Image (cartoon, coloured by chain):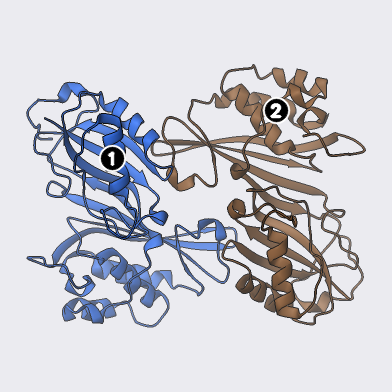
Chain colours: A brown, B blue
Amino acid sequence: MRHLKLTIMYDGTNYVGWQLQPNGISVQEKLEAAWLEITGETIRITASGRTDAGVHARRQVCSLKTETDLPCERIAFALTATTPFDISVLKVEAAPEGFHAIRDATSKTYRYQIQFGPVLDVLNRHHRWFIPRKLDIGAMQKAAELLSGQHDFGSFQTKGSARLTTVRNVTQLDVEYFRESIFEYVDIVIAADGFLYNMVRNIVGTLVRIGLGKENPEWVLSVLKRKDRCAAGETAPAQGLFLERVEYDNLSFAANNEAEGEAPVES
Amino acid sequence: MRHLKLTIMYDGTNYVGWQLQPNGISVQEKLEAAWLEITGETIRITASGRTDAGVHARRQVCSLKTETDLPCERIAFALTATTPFDISVLKVEAAPEGFHAIRDATSKTYRYQIQFGPVLDVLNRHHRWFIPRKLDIGAMQKAAELLSGQHDFGSFQTKGSARLTTVRNVTQLDVEYFRESIFEYVDIVIAADGFLYNMVRNIVGTLVRIGLGKENPEWVLSVLKRKDRCAAGETAPAQGLFLERVEYDNLSFAANNEAEGEAPVES
């Protein structure tokens, strides 16, 4: 059995999300169908986390077990050619035995993309949340600083997810402003050792509430204390959210077949 | 009668182009329908040039005559709100009497967007021509220099357009390379006093042929000499093309109603 790591990119606009669903087409379904077509194997492909309907990925990571002896590069090429135009397989690597994309992840980074101001930038409408108002970037940055670090993020978790703990360590939370001609944009980049369900979109909705002047930056401290989803801002819409990358600090991967069968290497 | 200048942006993906067509939905149709809904007037809206099916515009300019006395800013807002999500009206200005978006244009700028390399950047697939090969940017830049300036561009004109002359002055022809993570891009920016039918897409196809190493940069000189469409490269696909802006050097426009009725001002 070979253990492989796939790095994939997708535009989530036309999918019900990563995970197989009875009510629509998922990225997982397309990828597993392509795998079957290429290798004849029916396998399960596991992603580092299920992105929701409409959420995009620049570098999603998947793990799988296979008996195919196709070279890694050939697999990447064939999968990209066999999946629809909104899914690309960027890299296939040999992984240590037992590699599991969810369990082994040590850090994830998301980017949430917003455009704000009086007029919609139509060319980015599928990849940004449009807020037809002025945003106070300084206030959002202040609030982002207060949310950074290790906290109980229970207030930023959408119900339904049973977790042992709601404490997470947010290692990066940047509010990046930029302008292109008449259009103003803000990207919220957030990295953590793990995320609760809808945590990024709930943090973004909370920061936007502050950007709109409805609350002060310090309000986030009381939201954190409450540990109640109702305390925070609205859930930001899916189309602005991108899974940027997933880190596996303690593992190494090889871009060719040679590494196959080698013992896991600590980096 | 008020004469107005509209500056509009659209994503051309879902349109048969700017101009009214019996076989599909055009940007003009949507804009004229929105105008009727807002003002009750049935009018003709003229764009600086008809973009083809699938071509986009960052700053298309239109002219129209109206009897409405709605303020310019109110018109812009109402049109954006009434047209579909892939059309935005950026600005409405009072124009000198008789202003005509085609006839009065002194210069136009287009940007053609390409992504090249082994893997498709799925997030930009609607807005770039994907070329799954390596491109020699230096060779394309050399050829672009040779094409700059005043020439007879007859070889770059798709048949069917009757023009008095096929001589045009290309005042800018830049081949801009950039890279983002594993993806490589090239933008071709071209400005001229006027364009022949499909001229930008034919120049781009010709430059790409050189970038692929099928011809030397100097080949463009013999293409120019032939004055025959068959001499040049293929027509680049529509989805990479953006009308960037249109200049009206000898006219001035006013962003409010006050200028209305004033004599045309030379700038």
Q: Which residue is mark 1?
A: B7
- Mark 1 belongs to which subunit? B
Give coordinates of residue A217: x percent, y percent.
66, 20
Figure check: B231 above or below A165: below
Give coordinates of residue B173: x percent, y percent.
29, 61
Q: Residue at x 49, y 44 (%)?
A: A125
Based on the displayed image, in which of its 4 quarters is residue A202 positioned? top right
Quadrant location, the C terminus of chain A = bottom right
Circle 1 SS class: strand
Give coordinates of residue B260: x percent, y percent.
14, 25
Q: Residue at x 50, y 75 (%)?
A: B133
Figure check: B187 above or below B211: above
Q: Residue at x 80, y 66 (%)?
A: A253
Is A121 positioned to the left or the right of A199 in the image?
left
Give coordinates of residue A168: x percent, y percent.
83, 36
CA neighbours of label 2 inside 10 A, class few (<14), some (14 to 19), many (20+): some
Choose mark 2 or mark 1, whichever is in front: 1
Q: Nearer the viewer, residue B265 or B91?
A: B91
- Mark 2 belongs to which subunit? A
Q: Nearer the viewer, residue B202 or A232?
A: A232
Based on the displayed image, in which of its 4 quarters is residue B113 positioned? bottom left
Quadrant location, the N terminus of chain A = bottom right
Marker count (numbered): 2
Circle 2 SS class: helix
Query: Label 2 is placed on what type of residue?
Result: Glu
Q: Which mark is residue A145?
A: 2
Query: Label 1 is placed on what type of residue?
Result: Thr
